[in-house]
Image: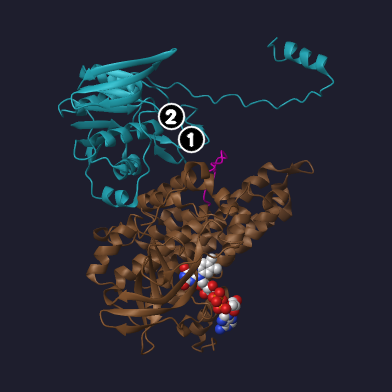
Amino acid sequence: MSSHQNTEDQIHRSQKKDLYESPDYYLLDELLTEEHKLVRSTVREWVKKEVSPVIEDFAQRAEFPKHLLPGLAEIGAFGPTIPQEYGGAGLDYISYGIIMQEIERGDSGIRSTASVQGSLVMYPIFAFGSEEQKQKYLPKLATGEMMGCFGLTEPDFGSNPAGMVSNFKDAGDDVILNGAKMWISNSPFADIAVVWAKNEEGIVHGLIVERGMEGFSTPETHGKWSLRASATGELVFDNVKVPKANILPGVKGMKGPLSCLNQARYGIAWGALGAAMDCYDTALRYSKERVQFGRPIGGFQLQQKKLAEMITEITKGQLVVWRLGTLKNENRATPEQISMAKRNSVETALNIAREARQMLGGMGITGEFPIMRHMMNLESVVTYEGTHDVHLLITGMDVTGLNAFK
Amino acid sequence: MKVLVCISNVPDTTTKITFTNNNTQFNTAGVQFILNPYDEIALARAIELCEGGKGTVTVINVGEASTEPTIRKALAIGADDAVRINIAPSDSYTVASQIAEYAKDKGFDIILTGRESIDYNGAQVAAMVGELLNIPSVSIIKKLDFDGTTATLDREIEGGKEVISLPTPFIASCAEGVAEPKIPNMRGIMSARTKPLAVVEPVAATALTSISSFETPAPRSAVKMVSADEVAKLVDMLHTEARVI
Ligand SMILES: Cc1cc2nc3c(=O)[nH]c(=O)nc-3n(C[C@H](O)[C@H](O)[C@H](O)COP(=O)(O)OP(=O)(O)OC[C@H]3O[C@@H](n4cnc5c(N)ncnc54)[C@H](O)[C@@H]3O)c2cc1C
């Protein structure tokens, strides 16, 4: 099992108070239940207390704040929609979106860890796993006692994962797994990996690979300028003997990984708006305090244009994800609708981060404020879980019925 | 063991305070309400004391239906059940008399409140409830231990600490140090849905006080800058304007 402790002297807590308030220009709170609001205030309180004071330092040092894992588990950020009998909370999808939004408001890297654990590891085990697999892994994944990662992308197959070459061959009670996965969030410390690989007939299956299995290694990827407070690495399989009992029995083909991505992308659609709102909130506050030419910069039309456009885009994005959540609760959200929301939220967030950063002038490039960190993080968010281009092509294909991928 | 925690619903600390009705009423429009932070401390300690099946925690709030989100939060944090006495909490006596009336025949071993509510800062309810129930009342405790029969309470006093030990039942008001407030979790929020929240009609009780008017503090005057080479001017201003020397 992973050790989730950063020794206390590695944790530097900033004294700066996190004053974040979320904008609600269209009174969308009226569309939320009391429970949704309690979920939101709970996660916000936790993020203000645990994430905001330390995140900048961990990001600067390019280190994952492992000590946050028990807290993330304790509030219920790992698999909140999974039923209680398997360690989840059985929450609805609006609550799930709100949790992701509040965590990403703190940092996209921390949200990534929660997304991977909940949507990409717990979800496939819950949806496609055998009863034994569910009993064995889900409760421990929910408490963070066990951490997971999701291996789909390969060095030569990113946007086109169906081309993957990782494969496994029958060997009696086991299979022998070979191949390599790249860009895998949480891989350096994960206890298990949900890996997608092809069988001898070329059909994709999901396998649960455990740390310690011979021939399985997880080298870390260094030198990232984005998601610096999240650990990314590879998964290398060199003739790894995986028991057949570790194969997810309930799914075959690309439907398996794609349905996981649907869950995670849904969370990102909410999450990225959290980063956008943090940038907006920071810039708005700064614009009222920073005085140039004898008046607050918020009084200048050029700055107001930036803020007005930000709140407009945020409001549109909020409406989109709320509606998407409602459809998802009714099991009516299509993958294409989720693609549109993921793409829109991340683009909104990136544009807002860039504008907001400029509004802070020189201060905007420092770690005194969260904007530049969000901006750099979002470069990963706009790439993973389907790139900006890929989601556009999905919408294009959906409306025309014509495939422009190949 | 049965523990009762008295909780109040107060404006968030960042609220901009304004008044209505000729400055006799707090303007609640647009105000975000929260669980009184000192009550969160009392609640956290109550939950700790009852952990592992050692007892049950009931929360009680004197207030109208609008306080229910705050009560649900207390249930999400870990209280077992809740009671709301359906009357506006117009003064400390109103609140205390309703709580005492409810608690008098329920056999609570320990009753806890926060040291004060952060809205009107009355700090009177605990002492009043103690008096009405004729049980010991200890104000502003910093620590609370209970071995099953005897409670040990620490109070801060001028230049030192007072340690009190007493049997149940008693009431105490809690300050920082008694416990770390707990953040609810998702399972708690889900289970709060189905925990009992009883609404009890108030007994007749007249408020003993009424508010004639509220006033906000005078706005802080602007900072006057005196340049470093004008010390005499500074001294003069401190003497004639600020009148502090
Ligand atoms: C920080 C981080 C964490 C990640 N975590 C995980 C993880 O946990 N698990 C996992 O499996 N993967 C993960 N990924 C991988 C991520 O999903 C891929 O990077 C992504 O799918 C893009 O693949 P690629 O990098 O190979 O880019 P490519 O697919 O090579 O794309 C390069 C460019 O070409 C464009 N392009 C590709 N195909 C087309 C087309 N048909 N038409 C037009 N343009 C096209 C793309 O939009 C992009 O701009 C992570 C990535 C990052 C950066």
- Rounded to the nearest angstrom, the CA distance separating label 2 from label 1 is 8 Å
Q: Which residue is mark 1?
A: B13
Q: Is residue B71 left or right of residue A5?
A: left
Which of marks 1 and 2 precedes in the sequence? 1
- Secondary element at image label 2: loop
Q: Is residue A292 left or right of residue A328?
A: right
**Residue at (35, 15) in percent of width and height:** B162
- Give how far across and how far down residue A353 sits, in percent: 62, 58
Query: Label for residue B118?
Result: 2
Tag 2: Cα neighbours inside 10 Å, few (<14), some, or many (≥20)? many
**Residue at (28, 36) in percent of width and height:** B48
Quarter-of-image position of residue A308:
bottom right
Subunit under mark 2: B
Is residue B174 in the magenta section?
no
Check the image and name the residue furthest to the top. Answer: B245
Closest to the observer: A37 or A111?
Answer: A111
Magenta-colored span: A12-23
**Rendered shade, chain B:** cyan
- Give how far across and how far down residue B167 sits, in percent: 20, 20
Q: Give the image quadrant in which the ligand numbered 1 is located.
A: bottom right
The answer, for residue B206, to whether it is visible in the render is no
- Secondary element at image label 1: loop
Q: Is residue A329 above or below residue A301?
A: below
At label 1, which amino acid type do we have?
Answer: Thr
